[in-house]
Amino acid sequence: MEFFPALSVALRALGRNKMRSVLTMLGMIIGVGAVIAMIAIGQGAAAKAQEQLAALGSNMLFVGSGSVNRYGLHVGSGQTKTLVYADSKAIVRECPSVFAAAPGTGTGQQVVYGNQNWATQINGTEPQYFQVRNWAFASGTSFGEDDVTQAANVAVLGDTIRKYLFGSNNPVGQTIRIGNLPFKVVGVLVPKGTSPGSGQDQDDAIFAPLTTVQKKLLGQEWLRWIMVSAVSRQASYIAQHQIEALLRDRHKIRPGEPDDFIVRNLADIADAEAEQGKVMTILLTIVASVSLLVGGIGIMNIMLVSVTERTREIGIRMAVGATEQDVRRQFLIEAIVIGLLGGAIGVVFGIGGSLAVAHLLGWPILISAYAVLISTLFALAIGTFFGLYPATKAAQLDPIEALRYE
């Protein structure tokens, strides 16, 4: 029997028991839909994490002041005073894999505008900081090199500060008070959201010239951190080793002695997040795939029942010339049709379910054509595998015994 006549017979056979056919497909529908939805949710979460990491900056490394050992007691990171402005310049000058570096320090202060006030972080840095962080401006502009040289009282606001102090009004050109000093607002940054590493609101900060914060707010010359941008993500690992070697040499740290600074590569965080996303996607897919196996068992059970019910029909076909191969092909095609129809409907339900989750729960999703293709092929494979035994059993029936079957 040719393929298309066999397909026509298979569809008529399934149509004679519509409810049973639909219930048989249900396992495949649920399985394929669950696989697509789980992969969409898993990949969406991974993509969101990568997006948050990209928002931190381009190929960025964080160089921070390290721990102090006082009489055998380590008082924690950020306590050394050996990280200085000259280190930042040396990193750009002597590390070939470094594209740019922005030195900085910070302090917590109360900020006031009119009858509104807000406690936030004041970061002192230089104009290239926004380039290193790949941070665009919603309005206004950055302070300039002249502002750093003159220790000018100018400030750039994060979006959270703008909302709490100014609401919907544009703060550019307005004057705010940081501590006891007036600062003119020159720019507002676009929102970046929370940091994926610490969960801290990146927009809850104000940026001012480094010299202004050092001289007028802190009274200190050393740095708390240096933000470094490598020439590429791959080069960030080389840049990390170059920076560590350079700072150990500049700070005269002997072999075997601990560093008085820390260097963190955000590419490591990105890789860890990506790996975690892959693991989560695989686990969710494995759980959802159990439904596909259950659906396959359902197909085999129904096909075995169908063989029993149509034993006499099989005998008649063999009596008029049908071969074992024809009978095997007929029942195998019926099983494959059930698998493919269930898979196709499952694709629709999986995409629809993913969109519903995104709309109702606000979760990020990423519907992958690869996941749809793999699920469909898996449904085909399940239908073929679990339909093979019933088809073989039907083909091996004795024609005489089949004709006598009541």
Image (spheres, rainbow, N blue to C red):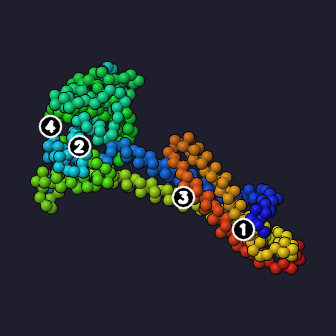
For the residue marked with disc 2, what is the amino acid?
Ala
In the picture, the disc for residue 332 is: 1
Front disc: 4 or 2? 2
| Residue beneath disc 2 | 101
Residue type beneath disc 3: Thr
Instruction: For marks 4 and 1, give the CA distance.
Output: 81 Å
Q: Looking at the picture, does residue 2 appear above or below residue 213?
A: below
Q: Amino acid at mark 4?
A: Gln
The image quarter containing residue 84 is top left
Q: In this figure, which residue is indicated by the disc labeled 3?
A: 285
Name the one closer to the observer, 335 or 104: 335
Residue 403 rendering spot, x and y as whole percentages: 88, 76
Residue visible at 82% across and 79% down?
Answer: 398
Name the residue located 25 percent from the left edge and 29 percent from the top edge: 143
Callout 3: few (<14), some (14-19), or many (20+) C-alpha neighbours within 10 Å?
A: many
N-terminal of the two: label 1 or label 2? 2
For the residues bearing labels 1 and 2, Cβ distance under 8 angstroms: no
For disc 2, the neighbor class at 10 Å (few under 14, some 14 to 19, many from 20) is many
Is label 1 in a helix, a strand or a loop?
helix
Q: Are marks 1 and 3 in contact (CB under 8 Å)?
A: no
9 or 267: nearer the eye? 9
Label 1: few (<14), some (14–19) or many (≥20) C-alpha neighbours in 10 Å? many
Q: CA distance from mark 1 to mark 3?
A: 27 Å
